[in-house]
Structure formats: structure tokens, C-alpha cells
């Protein structure tokens, strides 16, 4: 018969096992690579505000063209392989993943609401009523919300309030930022993850989580624009007053530069990518007219010699595409009316931002200070995964550990529309809001 101490230890062990949170797995699904970061529950150091990943895996992307999935089987296989590599390093089994993407015709818009308050301190219930009133204004036919973020609160018209609880006032207002993607794209992502034998924990906007990984707190407060230059898209997240206020996305990225080089030099895509990495630059350099580069020819003709061209020709192909992309993004941000702070700086992330000369072109186009962003507060990462290309995957972990509190959880948004149980009329405001989301979004 087991002794009482043994039984107590067994019960304590069972309780600890039941209370143990599952691992967090982030997958950055891009046009050039698929990366997976895995973090165990004990990987969060809240006192130091740092993270420790248990495993990292990445593979060359397949089945993704531009910002959309073009082959379900290939994309699912790439996701499964990246997760499997991260699992083997971490020594854990991953059940569900959160996908970071910049595709799906991503868009953002703001909604505002005001509710009356009695002569008493503002409570959690008052905040819930204000959120419910704002959520009731959301109409997104054919689209799925990814994030519903409170931008700012106001009390009696006084803006800039970060936490209105315990304050006195007659009216309470809230501004929400809603980031959404096309419903069909969301369903395709969900089905793709299921084909990889994984559960979809949520879908997040890549520029948003990249900014969480790359920006400092002061930059978010004073204003910043995080530009995520991926393989298939170039997207931007605008921060002001410590909050995300706008998201913009263009279906142009580093892969388009590679295609331009392949066409301009009559070489293969693999050859164009290699030339871009080794010799590519978006700005002029000394002696580029006399410096020659070699590119492999297209096809498999053994008698065909390499393509030889001056490096100035390569720069003449890359520079216009990079400049055009950034100028188009600048005009989109202007047209959006986003509240961009006059002194807001630019932070570049994404694999395409590592191309030589991109920072200098961004300085010229935006006329603002520009720096290259890297995953911060993850000090132990290997050198191979500390570059700007891995900000999105690291940002998903940042969001899970320290990210801003959203009005609706990602799991509710990911499962919206799947359940239709009646709601108890006596239920609280938060429960009714969640039920409304399930029925209407």
C-alpha cells in the first residue's frame, strides 16, 4: 500500500501536470521561408521582460506565392517540416500553432463608442459596456477580424487615458482598431494548418507582431512606423501614443526584386536570388561600371556560357523596384489619414530589408530616421535567427507574453462562427460580447 506521503506527492504531481500550460508555437508563413519558434511556459522572464525559446526551425517556403497559398499540400508540408524541426530542438510536442501572415487583403479601420457613467468610479463593467457598444458597430461582410485592439480611452472627452478604471466622469469613450483579412483566406490558412495535423490557435498580422519584437517602448510612445519587407508583401504598422493605430499592406516584396533580376539578366530564379544576395544593392557604389558579375543561364544547355553583366545593370534593376515599393507605401500611408507623429522614425524588418542600400533608400523616400530592426529581448537566439527576417515569429511570442490586451481573444476570433448556442439573458457583458462575435463575425 502506498504511503500517505507518496500519495500526496502523486496528487501534487498530477495537479502540476494539469495546471501546466501548453507550449506556444509561432509560425511565420512567408513567400521565401517558413519559420517556427517554440516557447515553453517557463520561457517568460517577466521581471526582465525577456523570452527564452525552446526550439527554432525554418525551411524554404513552398506552396506560397506572393501573399497567398497556391498549393495546399506543399504549404502544409512546409509548415509541418518547420514545426517538426523546432520540436526536435525543443524536445516537446506541438499541438497548435499561431500563424503570422501579411496576406489576405489585410486592412484596418477604427470604431468609436461612448457610454454614460453615473456618479461613481468607473468599473470593469463600464469598460465592458463601452467595448460592447464599439463592437456592435463592426460590420465586416466577407472578412474575419484578426485583432480588435483598444487604441485609447477617454473620460468626459479627455483623451489619452490608458486605464479609466477608478476615475470619475459622466461619459466613457473608447477607440478600437480592427485588423481584418478576407474570410476565404482565413479559411484557407485554417485548412492548411489542419492538413499539417496541427490546430490553429490564431492568425496574427505580421507587421503588428514584427513591431512588437523590433520596437522599443519609447518608439511606440513617441511614434514609429515598422515596415516589414517580406518576400511576397511589404507591410507597415504605425504606432502612436504607445498603441497600434494603423496597418497597411502592399502585395510587393523581395520575390518581385528576384523576378526582375531573373528577367533583366536572363537567368534562373535561383541564380537571380544568389546574385541579389551576393552582389545586390539599391544604391550606387564605386567602380560598379567596371565590376562584372556572372549569372547562370536559363535552361540545361551544357554549351551555354554564363551571363556576364556589369554590376551597374544589377543596381539599375533593383533600385527602381525598391524605391517604387517604398514610395507606394508612403502614399498609401498618407491617403489613410493615419495619425503619424511628425518625429516618428522608421524601423525596417523582414528578409528583404537586409538588401544593401535599402535603409538609405528609405531615408530618402520618407525623409525620416531609419534603422534596421531585430528581435529584441530574446538574448539567447543563435546568430542565424537573430536577423530582421525572424521578427514576425519572435513577435508572436512577445504578444503572448507581454503584448497589449485585446478586446477579444485570438482564440474566440479564430473560432468565430463555429458555435451557435443560445446565451443566458442573465449572462455578463463580456459573455454577451463573445456570443455576438460568434454570431456576427
Image (cartoon, rainbow, N blue to C red):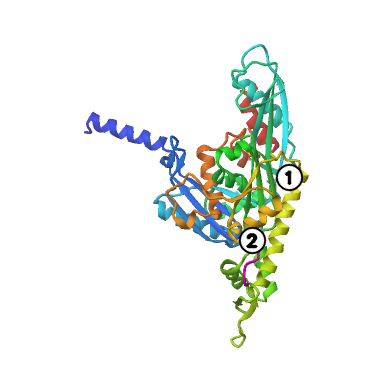
* Residue 362 is a magenta residue: no
The answer to whether residue 190 is seen in the rendering is no
Mark 2 secondary-structure assignment: helix
**Marked residue nearer the N-terminal end (1 or 2):** 1
Q: Quadrant of residue 78?
A: bottom right
Q: Are marks 1 and 2 in contact (CB under 8 Å)?
A: no
Q: How far from the left and from the top, in percent, is residue 252? A: 69, 58
State the residue in front, 54 or 80: 54
Residue 300, relative to residue 63: is it above or below?
Answer: below
Mark 1 secondary-structure assignment: loop
Dot 2, crowdedness within 10 Å: few (<14), some or many (≥20)?
many
Main SS of the magenta part reads loop
Report which residue position mark 1 lands on. Answer: 142
State the residue in front, 427 or 262: 262
Residue lying farthest to the front in this orientation:
286
Give the magenta-colored segment's residue range.
283-287
Q: How many marks?
A: 2
Picture disc at residue 1: none
Q: How far from the left and from the top, in percent, is residue 229? A: 63, 55
Q: How far from the left and from the top, in percent, is residue 413? A: 62, 39
Report which residue position mark 2 lands on. Answer: 254
Residue drawn 48% across the image and 44% down it: 377
Point out the image quarter for the C terminus.
top right
The answer to whether residue 328 is seen in the rendering is yes
Amino acid at each position: 500500500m502506498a504511503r500517505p506521503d507518496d500519495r500526496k506527492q502523486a496528487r501534487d504531481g498530477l495537479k502540476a501536470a494539469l495546471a501546466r500550460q501548453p507550449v506556444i508555437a509561432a509560425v511565420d508563413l512567408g513567400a521565401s521561408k517558413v519559420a517556427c519558434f517554440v516557447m515553453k511556459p517557463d520561457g517568460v522572464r517577466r521581471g526582465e521582460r525577456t523570452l527564452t525559446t525552446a526550439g527554432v526551425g525554418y525551411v524554404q517556403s513552398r506552396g506560397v506565392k506572393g501573399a497567398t497559398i497556391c498549393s495546399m499540400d506543399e504549404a502544409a508540408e512546409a509548415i509541418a517540416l518547420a514545426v517538426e524541426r523546432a520540436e526536435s530542438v525543443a524536445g516537446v510536442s506541438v499541438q497548435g500553432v499561431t500563424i503570422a501572415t501579411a496576406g489576405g487583403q489585410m486592412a484596418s479601420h477604427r470604431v468609436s463608442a461612448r457610454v454614460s457613467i453615473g456618479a461613481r468610479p468607473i468599473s470593469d463593467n463600464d469598460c465592458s459596456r463601452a467595448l460592447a457598444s464599439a463592437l456592435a458597430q463592426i460590420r465586416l461582410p466577407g472578412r474575419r477580424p484578426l485583432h480588435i485592439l483598444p487604441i485609447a480611452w477617454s473620460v468626459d472627452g479627455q483623451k489619452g487615458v490608458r486605464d479609466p478604471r477608478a476615475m470619475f466622469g459622466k461619459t466613457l469613450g473608447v477607440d478600437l482598431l480592427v485588423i481584418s483579412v478576407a474570410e476565404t483566406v482565413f479559411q484557407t490558412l485554417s485548412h492548411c494548418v489542419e492538413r499539417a495535423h496541427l490546430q490553429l490557435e490564431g492568425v496574427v498580422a505580421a507587421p503588428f507582431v514584427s513591431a512588437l519584437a523590433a520596437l522599443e517602448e519609447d518608439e511606440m510612445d513617441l511614434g514609429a512606423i515598422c515596415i516589414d519587407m517580406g518576400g511576397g508583401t511589404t507591410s507597415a504598422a504605425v504606432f502612436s501614443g504607445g498603441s497600434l493605430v494603423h496597418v497597411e499592406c502592399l502585395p510587393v516584396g523581395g520575390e518581385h526584386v528576384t523576378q526582375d533580376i531573373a528577367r533583366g539578366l536572363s537567368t534562373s530564379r535561383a541564380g537571380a536570388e544568389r546574385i541579389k544576395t551576393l552582389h545586390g544593392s539599391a544604391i550606387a557604389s564605386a567602380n560598379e561600371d567596371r565590376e562584372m558579375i556572372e549569372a547562370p543561364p536559363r535552361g540545361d544547355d551544357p554549351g551555354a556560357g554564363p551571363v556576364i553583366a556589369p554590376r551597374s545593370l544589377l543596381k539599375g534593376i533593383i533600385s527602381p523596384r525598391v524605391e517604387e515599393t517604398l514610395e507606394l507605401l508612403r502614399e498609401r500611408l498618407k491617403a489613410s489619414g493615419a495619425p503619424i507623429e511628425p518625429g516618428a522614425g522608421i524601423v525596417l524588418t523582414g528578409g528583404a530589408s537586409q538588401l544593401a542600400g535599402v535603409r538609405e533608400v528609405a531615408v530618402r523616400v520618407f525623409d525620416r530616421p531609419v534603422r534596421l530592426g531585430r528581435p529584441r529581448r530574446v538574448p539567447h537566439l543563435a546568430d542565424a535567427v537573430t536577423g530582421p527576417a525572424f521578427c514576425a515569429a519572435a513577435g508572436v511570442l512577445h504578444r503572448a507574453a507581454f503584448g497589449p490586451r485585446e478586446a477579444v481573444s485570438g482564440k474566440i476570433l479564430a473560432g468565430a462562427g463555429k458555435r451557435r448556442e443560445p446565451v443566458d439573458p442573465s449572462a455578463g457583458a463580456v459573455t454577451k460580447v463573445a456570443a455576438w462575435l460568434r454570431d456576427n463575425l
